[in-house]
Structure formats: C-alpha cells, structure tokens
Image (cartoon, rainbow, N blue to C red):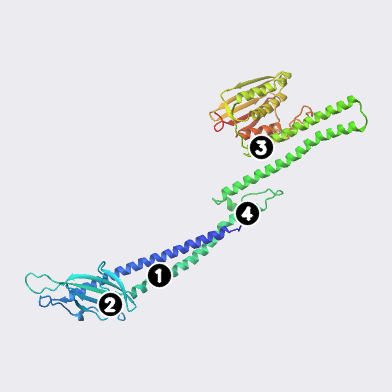
Amino acid sequence: MVKRRSITNRLIATVVIAQLLLVVGMVVTSVVYTQRRLKSALDTSLQGRVLSLVALVRDPDDAGNLRLDETLVPKSIDAKHPDIYQVETQGGAVLTRSAGWPPDLDPALGQKHPHFEFTHAGVPYRALRLSAPILDNDGEGPYSPPSVTVTYAIPMLDTRYQVRQTATDIAIVSLVMLLATSVLSLWAVKRGMSPLRELTAKAERVSIQNWDFESPAGVNSTQELYPLGQAMETMLSGLQRSFSQQRDFLANAAHELKTPVAVLKSTIQSLLQKPRSAEEYKLGLEQSSEDLDRLEMLLHSMLRLARAEQWSTGGLRRELEPVSLAITCQESLDRLSALSEARNLVVTLTADRSIYLRADPEDLGLVWTNLLENAIRYSPEGGVIEVTVKRNGSHDAVIAVQDRGCGIPADDLPHIFERFHRGDDSRARKTGGFGLGLAISKALVGAYGGTLTATSLEGEGTKMTVHLPLSANGR
C-alpha cells in the first residue's frame, strides 16, 4: 500500500528547515564577523604595545648596550591574566622578558607570519612578533640605531567570551524569530491550503447521481489552483455528457434492436403456428431476411460509430496514405447516381483536384455518402445538389454539400448530429435510417481533426460544411 504524505506537513517542514538553516547561517556569519573584528582590534592593540616597548629601549652610551626601563611598561588590562612579552637584541640575545613568559615557546612561531596564537597554562594568547629600530639617539654625528625584536602576547579569554556571548545572543534572538515565523508559516500554509481542501470536498460529492460541480471561490481566486478547478469542471462536464450519451446510446440501441428482433420473432412464430403453403413459407422467410438485413445494417452502423469515436479520441493509430478529396467525392456521387437519377436530381461537383489528405478513403467515402444521401432524400424532384471542394487558405480544406430541399426546423438543427436522432418520424422502416449517419460522419471528421457543421433555412435548403486541416495531414 502506498504511504500517503501530507503536502501541508511537507510545506511546513520545508519552511521550518529553511528558517533553521537561516538561523544557523546567521549565527555562523555573526560569529565569524565578530571574531574577525575583535581580532583586528586586538592586532591593532598588539601593534601599539609592541611599538611602546620599542620606544622604551635605550642605548645610553651609543655602544649597543641596550636597556629597557620595565617600570614604564604599560600595565595589562586583565590583571588575572597579564600580558607577556619578550625583547631580543639584534643578535638574538634576550634583552628582557616578562614574568610568566613560557620558556618552551616554539621560536619558529612568528617567523612566517607576525601574528600567531598559542596556549600557555590553559590560557589562549594572540601574539605579534615585530622587529623595529630603537628611537634613542642623543649624540651627534652619524648614527645607525640597532634594532630589537619584540614578541608581545595578549590573552584572548575576553575576546572569546565576547564571541560566545555574541553567538548566544544572536542564537536566542534567531530561535525566537524562528518560533514566531514557524507559527506564522503554519497558519499561512494551512490557510493557503484551504482552497484545495474545499476543492477536494466538492469533488468528493460528485457521483453518477450528482454531477453538480462548481469551483469554490477560493480556488477561482488562487492563481495556481484556478486552472485545476477549470480543468475539473471541463472534465466532469465531458464525463457527464459522455455518460449521458452512453446511457442514451444503450437505451436507443436496445430500442432499435428490439424492433427488428420482435418483428423477426413474430414472423417465425406465425409460420410455426400451423402448417403453411410453400408460398407462405417463402414470403415469411423473405420478410425475415429483410429484418435480418436491417438488423445487420444497424449493428454495422453501431460498430462503425464506435470505431470512429475511438479514432477521434486517439484510441486507435493508423498508417494512412494521402488520398484525393475530389476523387473520394466523385466516387460517392457515382455510388448514389442511381438514387439521384430516380428522383431526376442534378448533382454537380466543383472540386480542386490538388487537395490531398492523409486519410482512409473508406472513411471519407462514408462521410460524403451520408451527406449526399440526406441531400438526395430531402431534395424535391428535379432539384439541384451542389458539392464543392476547395481550399481555405493553405491549411484547411472545405467540402460543402448544398441542397434546395425543405430544410431542417430550427428546433431540430442542434440535435441532428446526435445518435439515433430522426428529424422525420414518419419514415417507413424500409426507407428510414437509424439516425446514425450524421453521428458517424461527425465522429469520422473529428477523427481527422476537422469539424462538421450544418446551416439550414426551412423551405430553402440545407448546407453541410466539412472543414479538414491540411497542415498536419495534407500535402
């Protein structure tokens, strides 16, 4: 079973972790900055102390016999942990050193860098080793003053204490801010997720008995959730429409199948009730054969519609070759020529024969046949039917079938592409269709990315227009 995780908890955890990392970064940055500033101040103090010691060195007889009056050496700030120093002559001899100077101090310290640190008696020190000439010259004439090397060390206990205190203060303030921002983030995240919870609650109430769904106001006012709410509305609207169509299709199919089956059953029962003559048996079988033909046609139309809808939704993939739209229209006209001639109709075809489409010729032929058959059926005897095939710019093909018949009532026009819809309820079983022709045609046209529309005026005729895109399929 897949473990479910809360988006709210993950968002809150992410915010808290980010804030915690920010606190750690602030503390570390503050400690490093404070430490550098304090060390810089300490180094300045060290340099001043070293120069003060150099200024106290004297050469009384100008013979290199250096002396340092230690009574004038500045007192240490920290009486408990006093400063320590050592003064060496130019030859490396120790001129003087303070009490407490570590005798085992590594003489290599301060050779590479004048500032260095060491620990003596558990106390950390920062030291400066600097060579400078003495400033004493009371005599006359040329004089080259000797230089001394002073190593001066100041305890760092106070510096480290200040660094720790700064880190502690910043950490406390940061943790208080972290707590406050975490509470604020918790409130903000939960408030921000409330539209999603409302959307979930709305979606949970949707069922096959209740298709009502409207995005909550909070979803519509949220930039990230608005597309989701609209997508759910569109999806559920499509599902409701598909569910209703499927239910109606099953009901209508059952009704359409029931009629020929009932008639066939009645004919067979009538033949079995009593002995019949050969002529009566022949007539009954002929009627049964007609009913079976009608049943077969209905099943074929239903299967064709199902396949067309699968193609239109991308459920089936086919390798198609370019076919001429003009040729497929001409073939459909030839196929229905006997029917049009029987009604003394004139059918004209005006076609651009350079238009090709990647399609199944049987699909296109079925579409043109359905449209032409309707036009022939509803045209008055001696009338004219016009079929045109032309380009609409460089990307679309337009195929139109125009008749001058009785037209379609305005109330029926929106429903003519629905399955099992019949605009003329007075048709006899032998001449009437099943109400699937236009539905199949629309589904087939949709399978190629096109549209099928109808315009009609009662008493003036009907025009069926097919738009097919050529940009992806044609040549």
Rounded to the nearest whole Å, what is the CA distance between mark 2 and mark 4? Answer: 77 Å
Badge 2 amino acid:
Asp
Neighbour class for label 3 at 10 Å: few (<14), some, many (≥20)? many
Q: Is residue 152 above or below residue 399?
A: below
Q: Is residue 28 left or right of residue 234?
A: left
Q: Which residue, given by chain and number where applicable, does mark 1 sit on? A: 167
Residue 242 at x, y = what percent?
68, 42
From the viewer's perspective, is the residue at label 1 or at label 4 nearer?
1
When asked about the image quadrant of residue 239, the answer is: top right
Residue 190 visible in the shown view: no
Badge 4 amino acid:
Thr
**The N terminus: image quadrant:** bottom right
Q: Which residue, given by chain and number where applicable, does mark 3 sit on? A: 309
When asked about the image quadrant of residue 58, the answer is: bottom left
Q: Is residue 323 above or below residue 103?
A: above
Q: Residue at x 61, y 21 (%)?
A: 350
Q: Could you tell me which secondary element the residue under label 2 belongs to?
A: loop
Q: Nearer the viewer, residue 39 or 190?
A: 39
Rounded to the nearest whole Å, what is the CA distance between mark 2 and mark 3? Answer: 96 Å
From the viewer's perspective, is the residue at label 1 or at label 2 nearer?
2
Residue 186 at x, y = what percent?
54, 62
> Which label's residue is closer to the chain start, 2 or 4?
2
